[in-house]
Image (spheres, grey):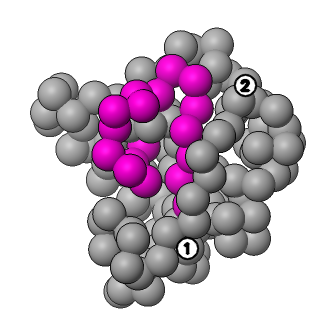
Amino acid sequence: MDAGAVVKRLKDADIGITAVAVQDENTDPNNLIGRPSGYVSRASADLPGGSEQGDKYTVARGLVVEVFATAGQAKTRSDYINAVQQGAAVLGTEWHYFTGGGTALVRVSGTLKPSQAKKVEAAVAAL
């Protein structure tokens, strides 16, 4: 399942997703689509509790899904993001959930209320 399909299914779970956008190599803010050790697809969406002023296509607006070729690559990406955020609190926090046999990393902004993040977690688990 690609990132767009994951976000569509999460939207269908009625967790408040709006403004869905599928990124390509021209709109990927991280420039990782199709690159070595990068993801194979990426999509983003707004969620209640995310920042409407956050940069377009970023987790600050609520949710990002990154799909990798292997579960190991997805885990490495999650570990990297967590390490960077732990080293620089100004970067905020995120919840991370995995689906698709571990190849899809669902990133949720740490600005969401924990109860909203739990709804996302349950929706991801149901995929």
Residue at (51% x, 21% y) in the render: 49
Residue at (74% x, 30% y) in the render: 15
Q: Nearer the viewer, residue 114 or 102?
A: 114
- The crowd level at tag 1 (other Cα within 10 Å; few <14, some 14-19, many 20+) is many
Q: Is residue 115 left or right of residue 40?
A: right
Please state which amino acid type lies under the numbered disc 2.
Answer: Lys
In this picture, is 85 found above or below 43? above
Residue 54 shown in magenta: yes
Give the image location of residue 51, x and y in percent.
40, 28
Please state which amino acid type lies under the numbered disc 1.
Answer: Ser
Majority secondary structure of magenta residues: loop
Q: Secondary structure at mark 2?
A: helix
In this picture, is 64 found above or below 17? below
Q: Secondary structure at mark 1?
A: strand
The circle on residue 63 is none
In this picture, is 108 found above or below 36? above
Residue 59 seen in render: yes
Give the image location of residue 87, x and y in percent.
14, 35
Residue with the mark numbered 1:
41
Quadrant of the image containing the N terminus: bottom right
Q: Nearer the viewer, residue 68 or 64?
A: 64
Residue at (39% x, 59% y) in the render: 77
Residue with the mark numbered 2:
119
When asked about the image quadrant of residue 103, the answer is: bottom right
Give the image location of residue 99, x and y in percent.
70, 54
Give the image location of residue 100, x and y in percent.
73, 62
Q: Nearer the viewer, residue 111 or 121?
A: 111
When asked about the image quadrant of residue 102, the answer is: bottom right
Q: Is residue 67 left or right of residue 92?
A: right
The magenta stretch is 43-59
